Amino acid sequence: MTQEQAFSILNTGANVFLTGEPGSGKTHTINRYVEYLRTCGIEPAITASTGIAATHIGGMTIHSWSGIGIRKTLSEQDLDELSSRERLVSRINRTHVLIIDEISMLDGRTLDSVEAVCRTLKRRDVPWGGMQVVFVGDFFQLPPVARFGEEKPQFAFLSQAWQGANPLICYLSEQHRQEDTLFLSVLTSIRNGLITPEVRATLSSRNTEAGATQEHTRLYSHNVNVDKVNDDRLSALAGDEKKFAMESHGGEALVSQLKRGCLSPELLRLKIGARVMFTKNNFEEGFVNGTMGEVEKFSESGGPLVRTKSGNLIAVEPMEWTIMDGSRTLARVVQFPLRLAWAMTVHKSQGATLDSAIVDLSQAFEYGQGYVAISRVRAFAGLYLTGFNERSLQVHPEIIKVDGTFRESSEGAEEVFGKISPDERLKIELNFITVCGGKIGGGKKKRKGAARKARGKTTYDETLAQFVSGSDIDAIAKARALTKGTILSHLEELVMRGKITGTELARIVPASIRKAIPEVSKVFKELGSDKLSPAYEKLNGKYSYDDLRLVRLAINARVE
């Protein structure tokens, strides 16, 4: 199936499993769908199974989004507790489209729990509470894992939640990463579990350090190997080392999640001559996740200037990684989009496209690990294997069995949708967008929003202008004809974006709120969350929701 066909199916509102080989365009297709929904005034929930994947797509983990945390199963009592969380209930009730990326790494029991939360909080006894669910990923890549003492994980497609969704399979067949015929045949053989003598011989021809100079990134199975290589190579460079600390804003738990998932380190250490890899996409500046380069010098302001392999000199600026809930930023970290790139783990290479790599699979321990590592490289000539064991060439036998079914189902969906006339398809699309409260071509809400856009301002800009002029919360709410709670949410967003400092915010934080900070902060820590409903209940209603929100704002802004 082509990307265009998959996009058309997504537009109808059908539940979908979007899959395909590495480089087939899954991320591009889903990004296009998200942009389409937003032009219709619909904000999808963008989630992923892991923190790393979540940072790639600018969303949050499905565990955080659904409120289940680290739990894989939920009791009735757990569901009742989740139903009492004001913000969680609001988030799920306004969600019409849920996207879950890297579905291969999500335990089926976790998916069942997420579905139960959606159905319960939406109070609709239909699968997923009636929302469109879009699963994205490739089961040939890294599988779900279990913590010590847990039962064996289950593939997501075996869960009741998957069966209830009954997704249409969109198996992308185009290839946009590798164009090397020999390389593609090797990857296909590994994917099909056909490790013939010819495949082994072909891979063995790359089992060499010959030509594998120190310019190539090394991929390892374990962090300890990666850290040693990067530390040793950086230390060997002459010159002073510069350190860049990550800036963070938001609740402790969500910030911690962002830091774990961010490919740029919390403390970035660089020297002139350091080999680096860009960790985000910025097409205007000429780099994507996986672009390689070398630090050529540092600017007058101290930032790194990186010469890419293609010869471009890029003055690198800090970028943001965020966890969003619709248009609201829950947490944000800021760092230069770089990491040392003499070595990295296979796990953290997911999502990256490398021109070349030295791959050590002698210690591979998981199904799909070798397949993921090898498929990161654009061409066979850029692959240098220093070793591989039997497990590194294996993909899960259960996935080989089900893959044929997925392909057949995709062909069936392609045939059925091919018979639908353009007029009928448009009618289906219009109906879906209308049900979701949107409008094709309507963009985000008109009137006030359109007027602000014409003035080049957002609603946050207008609140900020009022704040800067000296108004307090009540005065801003009155001037803007909005509730106090809405203004507080605007201020939270502005603090998160760094538009308002703690010193500036202190002006509107009364003494009563300052006195409450230690008590409320203690409760947030005990709960392991800064959500308002649980804190309100634990404090027996001692403070109003607006007061709690203002306390939380003061804590996050570090008001003295």
Image (spheres, rainbow, N blue to C red):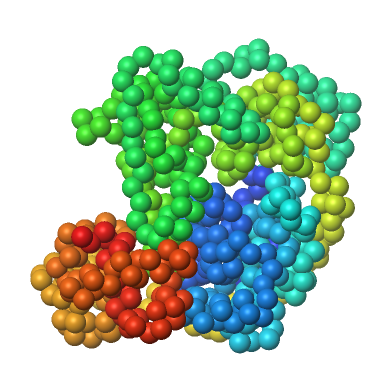
- Whether residue 19 is visible: no
Residue at the location (35% across, 70% down)? 520
Q: Position of residue 39 (x, y in %)?
A: 45, 70
Residue at the location (74% across, 68% down)? 162
Q: Is 172 on the left or on the right of 460, as rendered?
A: right
Residue nearer the viewer, 15 or 83: 83
Q: Looking at the image, how many numbered discs can be counted on the residues?
A: 0
Residue at the location (58% across, 30% down)? 224
Q: Position of residue 35 (x, y in %)?
A: 48, 63
- Above or below: residue 555 compared with residue 384: below
- Whether residue 479 is visible: yes
Rendered-image quadrant of the C terminus? bottom left
Residue at the location (40% across, 69% down)? 523
Rendered-image quadrant of the N terminus? bottom right
Query: Residue 69's quadrant in the figure?
Result: bottom right
Residue nearer the viewer, 421 or 1: 1
Q: Is 141 on the left or on the right of 238, as rendered?
A: right
Q: Position of residue 290 (x, y in %)?
A: 51, 37
Query: Residue 306's quadrant in the figure?
Result: top left
Identity of the residue furthest to the top in this view: 210
Residue nearer the viewer, 51 or 449: 51
Identity of the residue furthest to the left in this view: 470
Q: Position of residue 260 (x, y in %)?
A: 50, 47
Q: Is 466 on the left or on the right of 253, as rendered?
A: left
